[in-house]
Amino acid sequence: MTAMSSWEKKREQMVEEQLIPRGITDEATLRAMRTVPRHLFVDDAMGSCAYGDHPLPIGAGQTISQPYIVALMTQALQLKGHERVLEIGTGSGYQAAVLSRICDRVYTIERIDSLLVRARKIFDRLHYHNITSRLDDGTEGWPAEAPFEAIIVTAGGPSMPQPLIDQLTDPGRMIIPVGDQYLQELKLLEKIDGQTTVRTIEHVRFVNLVGAHGWTS
């Protein structure tokens, strides 16, 4: 058996100490969190902190989410492997990378060009070829590629953008932080037989969801 690298050990420690004790039990999610090299999605100077139990700045006023929150949101989607997933807010690219190890294809939208360019380079480096990205207003969704079996929004908005709800399949699931600009509730919307239900999973704090159906800044 090949010895684990120091990065693999850090990922294993992250899973065993931060995720499993907090109720992350989905095997596909845990496998993806063990696999994706989180340290590549942060600046080199922060590499030693990459697997810590906290978010980190990635530039342009944005952050890479705490590992637990990435895993929690991923697990909530209950992905089986065949899904096409829309992500709003590419950011560092880490959440999209985790999703790409579980589902069939990830479509991710970012509004800040510098972040998207960097994320694309990392996707290419890792040969994560089932991720498609674009620069746009994510609150409008991606009509040309809709519908999606799952949608994940990695920024907090004042409400759930109707275009995203409309682009969700039936059945389908969307996870999104909703609240004010300082604190949000992580909401899971499920669409089943033409009806939608919403429940709160966790209290969170995300950067602002900016766009036509979000905040202005």
Image (spheres, rainbow, N blue to C red):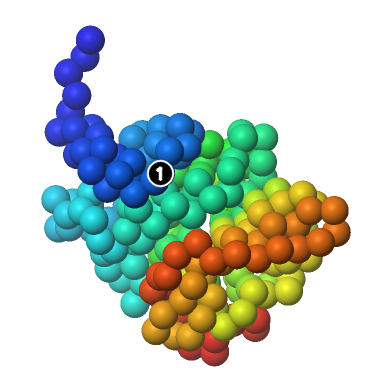
Q: For numbered disc 1, what is the local secondary structure?
A: loop
Q: In this rendered view, identify the residue nearer to me: 124 or 7.
A: 7
> For mark 1, does the 10 Å Cα neighbourhood hold few (<14), some (14 to 19), or many (20 or more) residues?
some
* Image location of residue 214, percent across then percent down: 59, 82
User: Which quarter shows the N terminus?
Assistant: top left
Q: Going 72% across and 52% down the picture, which residue do you hit?
A: 172
> Residue 52, relative to residue 21: is it above or below?
below
Left or right: residue 31 compared with residue 186: left
Instruction: Name the outermost residue toward the top.
Output: 1
Asked where in the image residue 9 lies, by quadrant, the reply is top left
Left or right: residue 57 compared with residue 107: left
> Residue 54, relative to residue 94: is it above or below?
below
Instruction: Name the outermost residue toward the bottom.
Output: 216
- Inspect the image, locate mark 1, and give the three-letter code of the amino acid beneath it: Ile
* Mark 1, residue position: 24
Q: Going 55% across and 45% down the picture, which residue do you hit?
A: 131
Q: In this rendered view, identify the residue nearer to me: 8 or 186.
A: 186
* Image location of residue 20, percent across then percent down: 33, 41
* Image location of residue 145, percent across then percent down: 74, 54
- Quick check: can you spot residue 206? yes
> Residue 49, relative to residue 97: is it above or below?
below
Q: Going 44% across and 85% down the picture, which residue do you hit?
A: 181
